[in-house]
Image (spheres, helix red, strand yellow):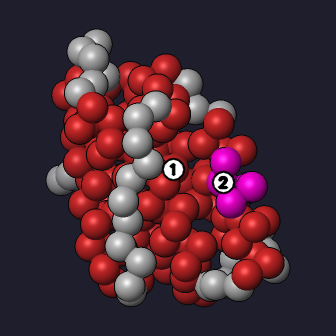
């Protein structure tokens, strides 16, 4: 296993935190945001190894705030790159990263009145970005 560079760790973090932000933004509500952030932090804290190191060290990612489309244009490619980085440098952690991101996204969606259709659609796009390329 090779060590990840700061830039690679930031890519993993951008993908993971961005996925949570995307789901949270899909069905916004102030009270929901608080519940959702608590739910997501629990899932992200469950990470281990390289994934935990990437998600708990270094600066927070800078994510666009203007539109859902703009956020997706940053987050989905970051998720794809994160999987490629892990496949190359730490293949044993690919599934762990996918699991942490999808669990966090799912917990965020369920934290406030169940999974809304918009949240389910975003989770599907996140799952697609995390998928093995054909």
Magenta segment, prevailing SS (helix, strand or loop): helix
Residue at image location 73% in from the left, 81% down from the top: 30
Quick check: can you spot residue 26? yes
**Dot 2: what SS?**
helix
Up-down relation of residue 19 to residue 26 (above or below): above
Residue at image location 55% in from the left, 72% down from the top: 23
Position in image of residue 122 (x %, y %): 48, 75
Position in image of residue 64 (x %, y %): 35, 73
Quick check: can you spot residue 128? no
Q: Which residue is mark 1?
A: 101
Q: Is residue 86 left or right of residue 34?
A: left
Residue 40 shows which numbered tag?
Answer: 2
- Tags 1 and 2 in contact by the CB under 8 Å rule? no
Up-down relation of residue 119 to residue 11 (above or below): below
Q: Is residue 44 left or right of residue 6?
A: right
Question: What residue span does the magenta drawing correspond to?
Answer: 37-41
Q: Nearer the viewer, mark 1 or mark 2?
A: 2
């Amino acid at each position: 296993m090779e060590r990840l560079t700061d830039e690679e760790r930031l890519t993993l973090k951008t993908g993971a935190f961005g996925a949570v932000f995307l789901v949270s933004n899909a069905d916004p509500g102030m009270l929901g945001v608080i519940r959702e952030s608590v739910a997501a932090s629990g899932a992200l804290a469950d990470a281990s190894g390289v994934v935990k190191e990437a998600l708990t060290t270094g600066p927070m990612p800078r994510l666009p705030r203007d539109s859902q489309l703009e956020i997706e244009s940053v987050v989905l490619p970051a998720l794809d790159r994160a999987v490629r980085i892990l496949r190359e440098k730490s293949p044993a952690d690919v599934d762990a990263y996918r699991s942490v991101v999808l669990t966090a996204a799912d917990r965020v969606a369920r934290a406030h009145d169940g999974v809304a259709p918009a949240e389910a659609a975003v989770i599907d796009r996140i799952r697609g970005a995390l998928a093995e390329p054909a």
